[in-house]
Amino acid sequence: MQLTLFSNYSLRLMMYVAVSKGQRVTIEDASKAYDISRAHLMKVAQFLVREGFLQAVRGRTGGLSLARPAEQIVVGSLVRATENGFDLVECMSERGCCKIGQVCRLRGVLGEAMQAFLQVLDRYTLADMVSRSEDFDFLRVA
C-alpha cells in the first residue's frame, strides 16, 4: 500500500505548520521548504481548511495555522480524510467482483491488515510527529 501524494503533502504541510511555533505559515514558504509545487500545496491547504485541520487568514499578514492544538489532531483522522479509500484489492470495493470471491479469504486478511494500519496511525497525534520541533529547523525559509 502507498499513500497518495495528496496525503503525503497533507501530512508534510500539517507538520510544517505545527513546528511554526504559533506563527502563520504561507503556502509559498512551505512550497520552498519542501521543494514541491505551490499549486499542489494550495489545493492541499484548501482541503485542510475545509476539513477543519487548518485555519487560513487572508491578507498581507495572513497565512495558515492549526485549527486546533497539535495534540488534538490524530494522524489516523488526517489520513482517513485525505485518502479516497482503503480498498487494497478490487474485491474490497463495493463494485468489486472476483471469480473466487465466495471462497477467498484474502479480503478478510487484507481488511484486518488495513484496520491494524489505521489503528497504529490513531495512536499518534500531530504533536507526536513534531515532538522535537528543533529537528525541523532546516526547513525554515530565510
Image (cartoon, helix red, strand yellow):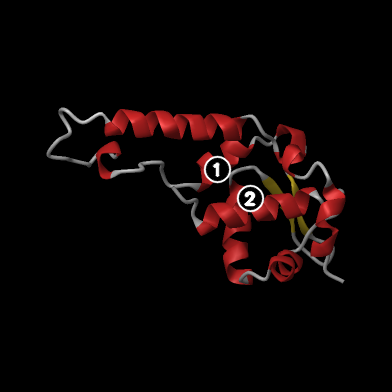
Give the residue pinned by disc 2.
11
Residue 46 visible in the shown view? no
Q: Secondary structure at mark 2?
A: helix
Residue at figure coordinates x 22%, y 41% from the top left: 96
Image: 119 above or below 97: above
- Left or right, 114 with respect to 129, comes to left
Contact between marks 1 and 2 (CB within 8 A): the answer is: yes
Coordinates of residue 90 in the picture (x, y in percent): 26, 44
| Mark 2 surroundings: few (<14), some (14-19) or many (≥20) residues within 10 A | some
Q: Is residue 7 visible?
A: yes
41 to the left or right of 33: left
Q: Residue 79, labelled with which disc?
A: 1
Residue for point 17% across, 33% down:
101
The amino acid sitting under disc 1 is: Val
Q: Nearer the viewer, residue 93 or 137?
A: 137
Q: Position of residue 6 (x, y in %)?
A: 53, 56
Can you give x and y, in whole percent of width and height, for residue 46 in the image? 60, 56
Q: Earlier in the sequence, mark 1 or mark 2?
A: 2
Q: Determine the residue positioned at 30% across, 43% down.
A: 89
**Spatial separation of the CA atoms under disc 1 and disc 2:** 8 Å
Decide which of 108, 97 is in the foreground and name it. 108
